[in-house]
Image (cartoon, rainbow, N blue to C red):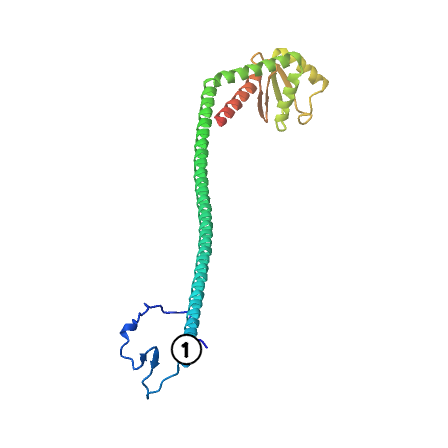
Amino acid sequence: MSRVIKNSQMLLTVPITIDPLEITETEDKVENGILFRDDNNHCNPPEMEDQEFERIKIESQKILTETEQMVMELLEKARDEARDIISNAREEAEVIKMQAGEEAVSIRKKAHQEAYEEGLRQAQQEIEGDRQAAMQQSQALLEEARQLKIKAFRSCEADMVRLVMATVKKVIASELKTNPDTIINILQEAIDFLDRPENITVYVNPQDLDKVLEVMDKGYLTDIGTNNNKISINADERISPGGCLLESDAGSVDAQLETRITSVNNAIQEVVADDY
C-alpha cells in the first residue's frame, strides 16, 4: 500500500535539504560499518539491516514513481483544463463575434430603414411642396389667361356684337328674299300670341300687303276667335319688309324686324355680361 496520498490539489513547497553531517545527536551509532541502536542495547543483524534498507529503497522508489505519476496526471489534467478553457473561450468568442455581427447587421438594417424612411418622408414633403407650388402656378396662369381672355373679349366685344347682328340681318334679308311667305309665318305667330283678340288691325310693309291679302282670301290663317272678329290689313312704310305690327282690344304685338333684332341683341348682351 502506497504511503502517498493522491490529491488533485497538491501544495508544492520548497524542499528541505538535510545535511548528513548535521545529524549528530542520534542515539544510533555506527561502528565499523555496523549500525548499533541504543534501545535496551539490542542490535539487528546485518541481513535485517540490508532487507530494511532495500525495503526503504523500494518504498522510496515507489513513492517517487507515484509522485511523478501524480504530477504528470496533474499536469495533464491542467493541460486538459487549459485546453477546455481555451476552447470554451474560443467558442464564447465566436458566439460573441457572431452576436456582434448579427447586432451590427441589425443596426445597419435599422439605420438603413430609418434613413430610407427619413429620405422617403423628405422626398414626399418635397414632392408635396412642388405639387402645391405647381398648382398655385397653374392657377395663377389660368387666372392670368382668363383675365387676358376677358380683356381681349371686352376690347372687341362691341365689334363682335355688331358682327353678330350684321350676320343676323343678312340672314333675315336672305330668308325674306328667297321665301316671301316668311311674313305669313311671322303674322301667324303674332296672332297666336294674342289671347282671344277682337277687331285686329295689322300693319305691314307695302311690299308684303298683296301677299297677306292673298293668304287672307284663301283662309290660310288659323281661326283667331269668333266669327265676328274682323281683321284689317293696312300698308305702312314705317314697317320694314318681313315685319308686322298688330293692334287689338286684347293688346298689341310688335313683330317688326327691328324689334326682333333688338331682342336678339339684348339677349347677346346678357349672355356676355353673365359670362364675363
Question: Which residue lies most toward the bottom here?
Answer: 40
Q: Position of residue 28 (x, y in %)?
A: 31, 81
- The kind of residue tagged 1 is Asp
Question: Which residue lies most toward the front here?
Answer: 32
**Is residue 35 placed above or below 123 in the rendered structure?**
below
Using residue 192 as the reference point, say whether residue 93 is left or right of it: left
Image-quadrant location for residue 190: top right
Image-quadrant location for residue 201: top right
> What residue is at 64 percent from the left and 25 percent from the top?
192
Q: Position of residue 117 (x, y in %)?
A: 45, 43
Closer-to-camera residue (213/128) = 128
Q: Position of residue 145 (x, y in %)?
A: 46, 24
Using residue 265 as the reference point, say whether residue 64 is left or right of it: left
Q: Position of residue 233 (x, y in %)?
A: 63, 16
> What residue sits right under mark 1 in the picture?
50
Question: Which residue lies most toward the right here?
Answer: 218
Label 1 SS: helix
**Is residue 211 placed above or below 49 in the rendered structure?**
above
**Is residue 24 placed above or below 201 in the rendered structure?**
below
Mark 1 closeness class: few <14, some 14–19, many ≥20 residues within 10 Å = few
Closer-to-camera residue (136/162) = 136
Residue 273 visible? The answer is: yes
Residue 235 visible? The answer is: no
Closer-to-camera residue (43/180) = 43
Q: How many marks?
A: 1
Closer-to-camera residue (156/251) = 156
